[in-house]
Amino acid sequence: MVVADISGLIEGAQSGAGLGHAFLKHIERTKIIVHLLDLYPSDNSDPAQNYRKIRKELEAFSPALAEKREIVAPNKIDLSVDDEALAKLQKDLPGVELFPISG
């Protein structure tokens, strides 16, 4: 099994922002995309919205890339004092199977 850790996909990548096309071309070779979502982002952003931004970039760059199998893994589940954040994420992403982890 080969695992590639490719962080840093940013909004506008499909137009060349950040690592842009080089980044997106690299992940075209993957069989599965693991979306590691910060359940408690330090910038107080919304994890569901962060996921949607990434999906939008993938879809805009390549319909084939957007169709790849994916695993959505909300991270930092160990910081949870209750199920509220995870329940909200599941509500905000209906139909998306979540695999909560603590990295």
Image: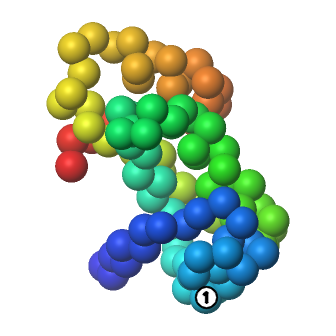
Whether residue 99 appears in this view of the structure is no
Q: Vertically, is 16 above or below 7?
A: below
Amino acid carrying label 1: it is Ala
Spot the residue most to the front.
43
**Number of residues whose C-alpha sits closer than 10 Å to that of mark 1, classed few (under 14), some (14–19) or many (20 or more):** few
| Residue 48 location, quadrant | top right
**Which residue is tagged 1?**
22
Query: Residue, x 47% and y 54% (percent of image)?
Result: 35
| Residue 20 location, quadrant | bottom right
Whether residue 89 appears in this view of the structure is yes
Q: Give the position of the N terminus as an image quadrant.
A: bottom left
Q: Of residues 78 and 2, which is closer to you in this image?
A: 78
Query: Residue, x 67% and y 75% (percent of image)?
Result: 17
Residue 97 % position (x, y): 51, 36
Q: Vertically, is 97 above or below 56?
A: above
Residue 43 % position (x, y): 43, 39
Secondary element type, mark 1: helix
